[in-house]
Image (cartoon, helix red, strand yellow):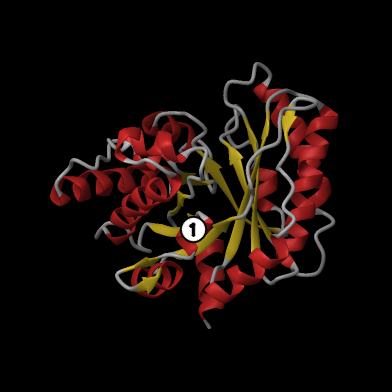
Amino acid sequence: MSKDKQTAQMSSKGGFIAALDQSGGSTPKALKLYGVDESAYSNDAEMFELIHQMRSRIISAPAFNGERVIAAILFERTMDSDIGGKPVPDYLWNDKGVVPILKIDQGLADESDGVKLMKPMPGLDDLLRRAVDAGMFGTKERSVIERASPSGIAAIVDQQFEVGDQVLSHGLVPILEPEVNINSPDKGECEEILKAEILKHLDKVSGDKKVMLKLTIPSTPRFYDELIAHDRTMRVVALSGGYSRDEANAKLAQNPAMIASFSRALTEGLSAQQSDEEFNSVLDAAIESIYRASIA
């Protein structure tokens, strides 16, 4: 069964997760970095079509396959789109050997008590049913920690695991992403509180179910080893969080068994103006560097 193969790949295969899930708020910046200015589109539909062209170019490139890229996180519109006449989730898994994962959060609420919780998701069950029908393996949901507020961080982790339980009830595997802002003045203290809160919740995950965690690369190398070793954790992956690719790779390599789930750091250096040969060469080098850091 493909689900068993996908579970094995997500649990232990060497490689990293490509985060191709820019949403409405982050798409203009992603396009600008790709060499597509805001003057190239006049509405959201045109903007999303341009970002889909960028994602399709990445996904269909020769270097993008399950040998080094074990999974890809998709925006909802990408899940519903096609590449080469095939639904993107089918194309990813059947043609590329890459596990498809869906970003489900609807963005961040305003900062309160040192954190930014996820906005309410009233239609989540319907979205999760569509994800199952589309052949998605799991989900990803992001919130952000700005300061070392014990009550705020507890609220973030409570919400993440609450949504995670809802995801698990549909037979999907959640990637819980309580990001710590890399520019937080008390980043290390945030991470200490966060780890303790996550451990409390992992101990309560029922039956044989497992979750994944997507975390900021810790200030202290190997700080999350206890989370990685927990029997309710399928995998712990790292976000690049604003670090350059080289910096993120160097920090990640100090954390064995933690693998990358990079977005901007993956697409760094790619341009709409590049020839296919140049584009594929730059992407191949990026994928190789992130892969090496992830298996270090």
Q: Check the image and report above or below for 285 versus 185.
A: below
Q: Which residue is pictured at 26% across the width and 58% down the height?
A: 61
Q: Residues within 10 Å of mark 1 (few under 14, many from 20)?
A: some
Locate residue 86: give its quadrant. Answer: bottom left
- Residue 111 is left or right of residue 68, and the answer is right
Percent position of residue 153, x then y: 78, 34
Q: Element under label 1?
A: helix
Percent position of residue 231, x then y: 72, 59
Q: Which residue is pictured at 39% across the width and 75% down the height?
A: 94
- Residue 113 is left or right of residue 23, and the answer is right
Locate residue 40: give its quadrant. Answer: top left
- Residue 138 is left or right of residue 273, and the answer is right
Viewer can see residue 239: yes
Question: Which residue lies most toward the bottom here?
Answer: 1
Q: Which residue is pictured at 61% across the width and 58% down the height?
A: 139
Q: How many marks?
A: 1
246 or 137, which lies in front? 137
204 or 281, which lies in front? 281
- Residue 213 is left or right of residue 13, and the answer is right
Viewer can see residue 172: no
* Quarter occupied by the C terminus: top left
Percent position of residue 98, x then y: 42, 65
Q: Check the image and report above or below for 203 versus 263.
A: below
Q: Amino acid type of disc 1?
A: Arg
Q: Which residue is pictured at 52% across the width and 44% down the height?
A: 256
Percent position of residue 267, x then y: 35, 41
Question: Which residue lies most toward the front here?
Answer: 42
Residue on which disc 1 sits: 77
